[in-house]
């Protein structure tokens, strides 16, 4: 954390300075009996449109208007700055009106989902590197199937009329594990309990197996690790893929609400401020 | 070490297209995608089954090489394909789902907005919050405050870009808040000229002050344009809850428009000047003389035997219900014990309103009865009311013209050739009496017209006394008038016959009017304090004749503050000295004058930038310590003379008194002005009780409620 802060010291300093300038300007503006809400609201709306424009920038990748990574940094910076503007705009109070309360909640959801996404996009890649192989998210079902097919093949090979320990073990403990993504919450929580439990069961099985079966079991163990790592990759990549499902759609509704709010304010605020 | 899951060579690795709208359904369900993938419209492109073609009576497989080529088995004899259907139902990609969700969210938001904004009038859902409790009754009626509420979305769009909306909305505020005056939207509710005048006055003060840094910086953003009208919402922001304070402003906000800016009340606030004595008190009262002279050593008992000495300040002054004002006790409770006998003035015969001049029988020969034949008329002129009533009488005016300068004290000294003119005067007076006794008040209305309304509808009425006088002095007046009208000689016996009748008629009705048979005069002696006739007369005369008041004989009598009497009313005249205590103020804008019958104004219509409430100060145990703030002026040996100068002034003739109508004239009232340092003792940074709004009003013309 300290390292991150140090690396971004210029950005943090710029953010703090700009925030202080905004707060001070707002307070000075308020002294002159001006409607600071109009100013903060106007700037906030412009910021929201610019933030939403980031999505457009991603679409227009052919245009040479700076790197997308730079745009992302700007998007994050501006997004955080809107929180300062927003707090000044609402004067640190929860709005009483229903429409404004919806707008308030909408903004908070978009903002916090953005912050969450920002944090996740910084944290998850490190975790993804720490375990398993980096795989393309869209191909995970394919890899899962391949693993499962291989496991089924190993099980079939060890299924003889005399001995059925491994097939039984597969049916009892491994089938559901290999059929789909499992233990997602435990992966999120960084828990390896399920692996330990499986490991214990495998260890308990070993005394009853002959050398051929032990070799198969060893291969199965490798596939279990492979599948578990794949699940790990899946769940964290899914998180990265899914948080924009909150952030982006609600941004559209936020802009629509904000535009209507602006219209209402301009028409009615001369007696309410 | 586990094996690699993912090959990246171009042959064994598909090129993923996550930006596509559709992905293979088999990939999602089974992890076994086809190499073709779904079409752009979400259709599966796999054609595992074909439409066998009939050639020569046999069906042949028609599957293309792209879809796996011709199958070995071939079609069934009935022409159906032998291959199972392996097509899938493609699914939306994550990106497509996100787009769809975005579209749904935008649609819901837009629909919700259209529902809320689409009505003919604003929906309650649009309200940004509850209004203050004082506006709660009109909360549901948006049009009461918002011009935009009169229409729908189209109107709002139009109004949103209209710069005059704020002022139009403010006009709606003023529909209810009419007490703020016509210029409420200008800074401080005063006219631009007045504002410039005040600003110029303040700028002339060169007391060194340091402007707070926040105000210096704020000035860079530009303060509101005080030369234009300001909307109410500049300061009052609604829809912040029932308990919101609409009048809250910080000290810095108050000062943002001011040319003289300072840190706080403790540091840099201008001196209070003469406050609260920047105008004279409405009732003339010399505190110093009363407390330090009259009531010392019980000296007042000598001249005011029934007088009661006040114990303390609150013997006369008590706070009103709000605690804001220190009310002055009523006359009966405070002044009457000493001054009631003075005002009743039982020895004073009264102010003459009607009198018969002395005319000798020689002149009145064959002119009917004339009771006042002996002695000397006391004044050169008739009483004021008589002169006014005879002003429009041609007979009287003709007689006056013939006589030249008339001195009623010497009427009997007229030349014989002027007897007829003197007799005409007598007949004019008789006609006046006759008309009044027969037609009453309408005669006054007819003769005085609109020029002297102060004499109309006198209360108590003069008519009964005049009728009574006619019956006593001229019992056969009707006959005399008739004979005189026929130019016949009128016998003078009538007056003698009346002598017997007069004894039965009460001479004094007990209503202030007295009829004197000794000098044939009708006088009015005020009934006491707050005499209704004099009060009404003063109120009317001061409105209509301020320019010529000093030449008005009646005014000279009734407004004489010296009680020294006049030619008409010899001797002390305490009962006429209403204006001895009740000052007169003139509105400099309208020119209208008003007598201050009460110590506090009924309604505050003049500028009032400062307010003060005694209540919090009294609750702090200062009640008995009024002198802590209101200290006597120690340096002046005789305040009475100074005080009187503020109220009364000698006319240029030095014979009569002029009323000083300048209410703003400084008057010490015997007290030192309240010191700024005295206030700072409590109102300072430590106690956090030095806000501007604690003492100052923004709306200088806001009328105050009657205390």
Image (tube, coloured by chain):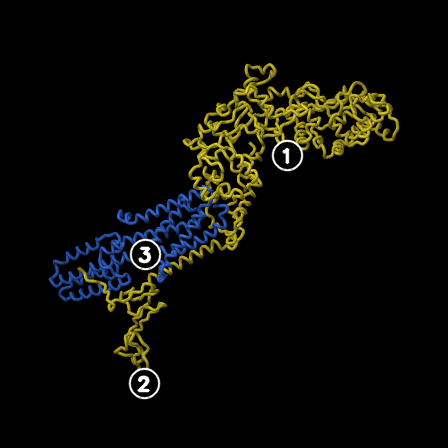
Chain colours: A blue, B yellow
Q: Which chain carries label 2?
A: B
Reading the image, the residue beneath label 1 is B591
Question: Is A152 on the left or on the right of B353, as rendered?
Answer: left
Describe the element under mark 2 as helix, strand or loop. Answer: loop
Q: Name the residue under label 3.
A: A69
- Looking at the image, which residue sits at the far left? A211
Residue identifier under label 2? B56
Above or below, comparing residue A242 to residue B573 in the picture:
below
Quadrant of the rendering where the C terminus of chain B is positioned:
top right
Nearer to us: label 3 or label 2: 3
Q: Is residue B333 above or below residue B175?
A: above
Q: How far apart are marks 2 and 1 (CA)?
A: 124 Å
Q: Please state the horizontal and vertical placement of residue B199, each as a whole percent of the image.
A: 53, 37
Disc 3 from disc 1: Cα separation: 77 Å
Disc 1 is placed on an element classified as: loop
Q: Residues within 10 Å of mark 1 (few under 14, many from 20)?
A: few
Question: Nearest the camera: B343 or B108?
Answer: B343
Subunit bearing disc 3: A
């Amino acid at each position: 954390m300290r390292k991150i802060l140090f690396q971004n010291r210029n950005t943090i300093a710029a953010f703090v300075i700009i925030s202080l300038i905004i707060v001070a300007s707002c307070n000075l503006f308020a002294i002159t009996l001006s409607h600071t809400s109009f100013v903060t609201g106007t700037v906030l709306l412009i910021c929201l449109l610019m933030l939403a424009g980031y999505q457009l920038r991603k679409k227009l990748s052919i245009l040479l208007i700076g790197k997308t990574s730079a745009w992302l940094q700007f998007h994050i910076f501006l997004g955080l700055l809107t929180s300062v503007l927003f707090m000044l705009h609402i004067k640190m109070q929860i709005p009483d009106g229903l429409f404004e309360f919806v707008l308030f909640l909408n903004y908070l959801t978009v903002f916090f989902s953005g912050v969450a996404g920002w944090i996740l996009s910084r944290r998850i890649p490190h975790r993804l590197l720490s375990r398993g192989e980096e795989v393309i998210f869209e191909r995970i079902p394919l890899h899962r199937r391949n693993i499962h097919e291989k496991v089924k093949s190993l099980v079939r090979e060890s299924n003889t009329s005399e001995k059925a320990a491994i097939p039984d073990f597969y049916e009892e403990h491994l089938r559901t594990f290999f059929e789909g993504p499992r233990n997602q919450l435990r992966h999120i929580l960084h828990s390896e309990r399920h692996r330990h439990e499986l490991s214990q069961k495998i260890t308990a099985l070993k005394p009853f197996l002959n050398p051929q079966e032990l070799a198969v079991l060893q291969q199965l163990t490798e596939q279990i690790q492979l599948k578990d790592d794949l699940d790990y990759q899946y769940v964290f990549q899914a998180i990265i893929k899914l948080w924009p499902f909150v952030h982006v759609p609600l941004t559209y509704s936020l802009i629509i609400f904000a535009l209507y709010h602006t219209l209402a304010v301009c028409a009615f605020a001369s007696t309410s401020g | 070490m586990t094996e690699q899951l993912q090959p990246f060579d171009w042959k064994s690795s598909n090129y993923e297209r996550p930006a596509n709208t559709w992905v293979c359904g088999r990939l999602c369900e089974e992890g076994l995608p086809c190499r073709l993938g779904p079409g752009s419209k979400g259709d599966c492109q796999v054609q595992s089954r074909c439409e066998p073609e009939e050639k020569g009576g046999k069906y042949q497989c028609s599957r293309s090489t792209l879809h796996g080529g011709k199958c070995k088995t071939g079609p069934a004899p009935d022409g159906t394909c032998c291959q199972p259907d392996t097509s899938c139902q493609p699914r939306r990609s994550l990106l497509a789902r996100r787009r769809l969700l975005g579209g749904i969210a935008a649609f819901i938001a837009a629909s919700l907005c259209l529902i809320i904004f689409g009505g003919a009038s604003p929906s309650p859902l649009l309200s940004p919050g509850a209004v203050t409790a004082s506006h709660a009754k009109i909360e549901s009626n948006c049009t009461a405050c918002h011009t935009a509420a009169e229409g729908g979305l189209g109107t709002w769009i139009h109004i949103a870009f209209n710069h005059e909306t704020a002022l139009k909305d403010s006009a709606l505020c003023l529909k209810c808040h009419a007490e703020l005056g016509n210029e409420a939207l200008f800074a401080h509710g005063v006219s631009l000229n007045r504002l410039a005048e005040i600003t110029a006055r303040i700028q002339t003060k060169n007391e060194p002050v340091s402007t707070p840094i926040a105000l210096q910086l704020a000035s860079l953003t530009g303060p509101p344009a005080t030369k234009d009208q300001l909307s109410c919402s500049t300061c009052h922001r609604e829809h912040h809850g029932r308990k919101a304070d609409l009048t809250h402003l910080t000290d810095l906000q108050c000062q943002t428009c001011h040319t003289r800016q300072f840190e706080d009340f403790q540091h840099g606030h201008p001196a209070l000047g003469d406050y609260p004595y920047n105008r004279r008190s409405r009732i003339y009262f010399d505190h110093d003389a009363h407390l330090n002279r009259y009531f010392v050593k019980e000296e007042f008992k000598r001249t005011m035997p029934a007088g009661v000495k006040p114990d303390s300040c609150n013997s006369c002054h008590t706070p009103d219900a709000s605690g804001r004002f220190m009310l002055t006790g009523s006359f009966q409770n405070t002044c009457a014990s000493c001054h009631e006998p003075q005002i009743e003035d039982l020895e004073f015969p009264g102010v003459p309103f009607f009198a018969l001049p002395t005319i000798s029988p020689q002149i009145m020969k064959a002119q009917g009865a004339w009771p006042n034949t002996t002695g000397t008329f006391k004044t050169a002129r008739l009483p004021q009311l008589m002169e006014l009533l005879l002003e429009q009488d041609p007979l009287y005016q003709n007689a006056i013209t013939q006589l030249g300068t008339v001195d009623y004290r010497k009427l009997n000294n007229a030349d014989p050739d002027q007897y007829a003119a003197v007799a005409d005067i007598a007949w004019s007076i008789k006609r006046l009496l006759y008309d009044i006794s027969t037609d009453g008040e309408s005669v006054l209305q007819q003769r005085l017209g609109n020029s002297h309304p102060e004499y109309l509808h006198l209360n108590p009425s003069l008519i009964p006394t005049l009728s009574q006088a006619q019956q006593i002095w001229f019992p056969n007046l009707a006959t005399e008038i008739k004979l005189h009208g026929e130019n016949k000689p009128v016998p003078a016996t009538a007056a003698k016959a009346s002598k017997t009748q007069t004894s039965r008629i009460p001479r004094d009705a007990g209503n202030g009017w007295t009829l004197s048979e000794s000098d044939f005069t009708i006088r009015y002696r005020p009934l006491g304090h707050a005499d209704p006739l004099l009060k009404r007369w003063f109120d009317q005369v001061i409105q209509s004749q301020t320019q010529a008041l000093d030449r008005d004989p009646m005014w000279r009598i009734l407004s004489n503050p010296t009680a020294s009497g006049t030619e008409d009313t010899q001797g002390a005249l305490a009962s006429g000295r209403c204006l001895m205590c009740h000052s007169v103020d003139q509105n400099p804008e309208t020119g209208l004058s008003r007598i201050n019958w009460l110590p506090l104004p009924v309604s505050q219509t003049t500028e009032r930038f400062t307010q003060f409430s005694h209540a919090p100060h009294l609750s702090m145990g200062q009640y008995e310590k009024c002198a802590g703030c209101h200290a006597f002026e120690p340096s002046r040996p005789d305040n009475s003379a100074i005080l009187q100068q503020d109220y009364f002034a000698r006319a240029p003739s030095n014979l009569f008194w002029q009323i000083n109508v300048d209410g703003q004239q400084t008057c010490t009232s015997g007290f030192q002005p309240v010191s700024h340092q005295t206030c700072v003792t409590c109102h300072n940074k430590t106690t956090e009780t030095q806000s501007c709004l604690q003492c100052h009003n923004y709306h200088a013309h806001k009328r105050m409620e009657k205390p």
